[in-house]
Image (cartoon, helix red, strand yellow):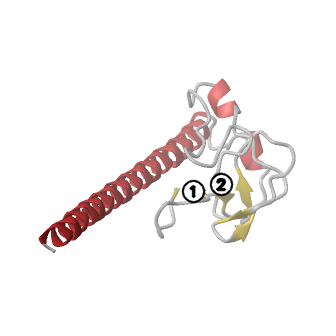
Amino acid sequence: MLGYQRLTNDKLRIFLGLGALFVTTAFIVIGVQKHVAQNQDAARLADIRSLLNAAKNQQVDNEGDYLENIENAAPGVLYLIGTSSEDCARSCIGLQTNSACLDLSTLSSTGYLQEIPFDPAHGDPRQTGYYLIRKATEELEIGACQSSSEQKLSVSR
């Protein structure tokens, strides 16, 4: 009878040990995922700030005139930034983007940016995952279509 009880206690210890290992692993994975998401949002914010700074520096250097593609953008319309000439109409921050992407590659070819940045998780040069809105007041808003948090990532000036 004592041998049977010992076997049961051994199984219980193994089961509890494996359970504790599983819970610990789950906490580590969740922590890593949260850290990765925070890093992606930090990269997104740095990207949209660099895009806005480049557009504004180009405007200052050209006596107040924006880059031609920005100048031709309709005020108040949300444009996905990218080089694609099709499939740019998609949902971004809960709004529909214009059907044509807004190509800002001239900012890199003229030296204002080394390259056009794109979203670390969902973007590429054709569709960066970032948007631009030129407001009627000539203010620009540049932001990320997606965020790892509930917070909208955008900058304007």
Provide residue 51's location: percent of width, then percent of height.
Answer: 56, 43
Identity of the residue furthest to the left in this view:
2
Q: Residue at x 64, y 33 (%)?
A: 107
Mark found first going from the N terminus, 2 or 1: 2
Element type at mark 1: strand
Rate crowding at label 1 as few (under 14), some (14 to 19) or many (20 or more) other CA atoms within 10 Å.
many
Q: Provide residue 5's location: percent of width, then percent of height.
A: 17, 72
For residue 118, side relative to residue 44 (left or right): right
Number of on-image labels: 2
Relative to residue 104, is residue 111 depicted above or below?
above
Residue 118, by quadrant, is top right
Q: Mark 2 — residue?
A: 131
The residue sitting at 31% across, 55% down in the picture is 28
Q: Position of residue 148 (x, y in %)?
A: 49, 60
Name the residue type under label 2. Tyr
The answer to whether mark 2 and mark 1 are in CB contact below 8 A is yes
Q: Amino acid at mark 1?
A: Gly
Q: How many other residues sit within 10 Å of disc 2, few (<14), some (14-19) or many (≥20)?
A: many
Q: Residue at x 62, y 59 (%)?
A: 145
> Circle 1 sits on which residue?
143
In what quadrant of the picture does the N terminus appear? bottom left
**Nearest the eye: 137 or 90:** 90
Q: Position of residue 103 (x, y in %)?
A: 75, 41
